[in-house]
Image (cartoon, rainbow, N blue to C red):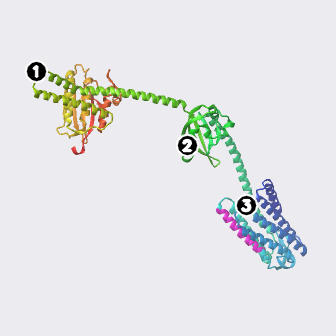
């Protein structure tokens, strides 16, 4: 039964080795199983002999089988676990070979110095033959080979378990150690007559073979499972390939895959249609071949950045086969294929978008020019309104001087005062032009110490004729103790004047409702807040929209007055805004910062 089981396993794994010659562990297992079957046959032969000479002859064949089993076992551990120490392998094989040679040299055999007789004992329900004699000291060589074999198995098993690459290493190694040690004990007890028992080493090696066969079968089952998984994975890969092909072909632009050096690996039909190069031509090209020579270094640098940073974008003129150029935008993302870095990317034709952007930029420049012209017009209106008062003063004083000069004896003192007024008015007109231009060009305001109420005085003085003509009733309110303000007087007066004029125009359609204009100045800690309130028609549209350039509700307005006012206030570090009144009209506020030492 032992021989039949061993030969069956030997045949199975011998066939495995014939199909896969690299499976040296299967070959070693086949030799060990076949040798174990031979040992079992020799043991059965010896159990049924009755003469001494035949027994000695059978024992020599038995030792040959044991030698083959030992060498095959060492070879199996070497190829299957791959962790045995070479010097231990050589020691085991050397000792077992030495025991075999001694068995042929010495008479009657290496195990006994002399054999007294063959006796029959009962074993497993039948009569078998055993030897009674004097054990030979040379038998220690065989026993020592078994102990070294056990040490080799323990070392190889331990080292393989530390690596963790063989799940069944412990089972194989420990079972082999167990059966080898058990065999060593059984052989020693039998030789020295401690127990009456025939030599049955094949039973112990059969245990080793069974465990090893189970592990090899597990390996074959794992291989079969892996093969099934591989077939399933191949089917999945084919489906993924189909999906990838569909994605490549459905991309809205040029989709491609290239190596880290720019070699074209894969591309879609859109790529072929846009570039005009066939598949055979593209397969021989690099990414740089699709752009003009002046931009090739840009493409190489973009590819290096994409590989280093996980992606990049680049735009260049795509050189088509027909010599035409088309501006394209490319997005590149690195991917790992077979352990090698690659780049997958998509290219989109942006020629029309860039042309549109250029046209848009041209239109924007034209609009900017129109805005500048409008700003000049509004600035001219602002300057004209502001210098109207000094020009009127200059004109009236000049006319008065002419009348005085018509006298035979003109009053020189009065003429001197008139000329001083003319000079003062002229200087004011020049300041208006200079300071408003500086503010509107985002220059720094010329700061001076100003009493806040004096700003109301000056602005109301310049708007007096308009207020009187419109029939507006003006009220003023401010704290008695206001800090001195550091500001550029002329532009701030211009802001107040503009807000007052807007309020007058807003109250033109009040009808029978009286026209009320309220000017207030409030100290808010680090700010002074100026407010201009009217009870006119109120605001039309969004509160912030009225501060946008060119937004106007006036028939002949350009919509830059409040924009200029906001620019002036912001240049002083303040803010300008408006509120809707609960009843009628609106209130415009602006804040100006207070210098810390004036708090």
In this view, the residue farthest toward the top is: 511
Of label 1 and label 3, which has the lower sequence position? 3
Of label 2 and label 1, which has the lower sequence position? 2
- Position of residue 333 relative to residue 188, above or below, is above
Residue found 66% across the figure and 62% down from its top? 161
In this view, the residue farthest toward the front is: 408
In this orientation, which residue lies closer to the viewer: 576 or 280? 280
Mark nearest the camera among 3 and 2 is 2
Residue 426 in view, yes or no: yes
What span is in magenta? Answer: 142-162
Local secondary structure at mark 2: helix
**Where does the image place residue 242, in percent across and percent down from the top left?**
66, 38
411 part of magenta stretch: no
Q: Magenta-highlighted stretch: main secondary structure?
A: helix
* Residues packed near mark 2 inside 10 Å, few (<14), some (14 to 19) or many (20 plus): many
Mark nearest the camera among 1 and 3 is 1
**Where does the image place residue 294, in percent across and percent down from the top left?**
56, 39
Q: Which residue is mark 2?
A: 302
Q: Which quadrant would residue 561 be assigned to in this image? A: top left
The reply to whether discs 3 and 2 touch (Cβ–Cβ < 8 Å) is no
Residue 80's disc number: 3
- Position of residue 204 relative to residue 475, above or below, is below
**Where does the image place residue 454, in percent across and percent down from the top left?**
19, 34
**Which quarter of the rendered picture does the C terminus lie within?**
top left
* Residues packed near mark 1 inside 10 Å, few (<14), some (14 to 19) or many (20 plus): few
**Where does the image place residue 92, in percent across and percent down from the top left?**
75, 70
Of label 3 and label 2, which has the lower sequence position? 3
Mark nearest the camera among 2 and 1 is 1
**Which quarter of the rendered picture does the N terminus lie within?**
bottom right
Q: Which residue is mark 1?
A: 407
The reply to whether discs 1 and 3 touch (Cβ–Cβ < 8 Å) is no
């Amino acid at each position: 039964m032992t021989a039949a089981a061993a030969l069956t396993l030997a045949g199975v794994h011998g066939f495995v080795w014939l199909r896969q010659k690299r499976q040296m562990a299967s070959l070693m297992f086949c030799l060990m199983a076949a040798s174990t079957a031979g040992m079992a046959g020799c043991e059965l032969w010896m159990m049924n002999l009755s003469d001494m000479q035949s027994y000695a002859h059978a024992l020599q064949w038995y030792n040959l089988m044991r030698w083959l089993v030992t060498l095959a076992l060492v070879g199996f551990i070497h190829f299957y676990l791959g962790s045995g120490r070479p010097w231990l392998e050589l020691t085991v094989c050397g000792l077992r070979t030495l025991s075999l040679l001694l068995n042929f040299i010495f008479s009657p055999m290496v195990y006994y110095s002399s054999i007294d007789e063959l006796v029959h004992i009962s074993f497993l329900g039948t009569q078998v033959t055993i030897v009674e004699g004097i054990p030979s000291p040379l038998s220690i060589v065989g026993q020592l080979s078994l102990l070294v074999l056990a040490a080799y198995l323990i070392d190889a098993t331990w080292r393989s378990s530390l690596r963790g690459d063989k799940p069944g290493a412990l089972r194989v190694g420990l079972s082999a150690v167990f059966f080898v040690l058990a065999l060593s004990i059984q052989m020693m007890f039998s030789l020295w007559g401690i127990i009456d028992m025939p030599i049955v080493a094949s039973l112990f090696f059969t245990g080793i073979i069974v465990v090893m066969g189970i592990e090899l079968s597990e390996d074959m089952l794992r291989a079969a499972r892996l093969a099934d998984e591989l077939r399933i994975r191949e089917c999945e890969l084919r489906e993924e390939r189909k999906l990838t092909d569909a994605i490549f072909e459905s991309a809205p632009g040029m989709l491609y895959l290239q190596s880290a050096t720019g070699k074209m690996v894969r591309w879609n039909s859109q790529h072929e249609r846009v570039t005009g190069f066939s598949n055979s031509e593209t397969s021989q090209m690099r990414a740089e071949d699709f752009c003009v020579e002046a931009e090739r270094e840009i493409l190489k640098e973009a590819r290096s950045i994409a590989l280093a940073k996980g992606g990049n974008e680049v735009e260049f003129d795509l050189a088509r086969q027909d010599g035409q150029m088309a501006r394209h935008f490319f997005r590149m993302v690195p991917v790992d294929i077979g352990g090698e870095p690659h780049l997958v990317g998509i290219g989109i034709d942006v020629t029309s978008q860039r042309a549109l952007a250029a046209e848009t930029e041209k239109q924007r420049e034209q609009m900017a020019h129109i805005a500048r012209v409008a700003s000049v017009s509004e600035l001219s209106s602002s300057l004209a309104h502001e210098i109207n008062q000094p020009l009127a003063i200059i004109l009236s004083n000049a006319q008065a001087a002419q009348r005085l000069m018509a006298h035979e004896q003109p009053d020189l003192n009065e003429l001197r005062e008139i000329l001083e007024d003319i000079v003062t008015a002229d200087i004011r007109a020049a300041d208006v032009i200079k300071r408003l231009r500086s503010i509107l060009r985002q220059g720094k305001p010329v700061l001076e110490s100003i009493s806040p109420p004096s700003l109301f005085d000056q602005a109301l003085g310049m708007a007096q004729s308009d207020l009187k003509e419109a029939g507006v009733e003006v009220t003023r309110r401010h704290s008695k103790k206001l800090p001195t303000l550091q500001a550029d007087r002329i532009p701030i007066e211009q802001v107040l004047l503009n807000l007052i004029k807007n309020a007058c125009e807003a109250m033109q359609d009040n009808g029978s409702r009286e026209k009320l204009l309220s000017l207030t100045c409030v100290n808010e800690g680090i700010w002074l807040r100026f407010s201009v309130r009217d009870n006119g028609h109120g605001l039309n549209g969004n509160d912030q929209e009225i501060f946008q350039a060119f937004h106007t509700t006036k028939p002949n307005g350009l919509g830059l007055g409040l924009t200029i006012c906001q620019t002036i206030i912001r240049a002083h570090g303040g803010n300008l805004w408006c509120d809707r009144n609960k009843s009628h009209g609106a209130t415009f506020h602006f804040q100006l910062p207070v210098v810390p030492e004036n708090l």
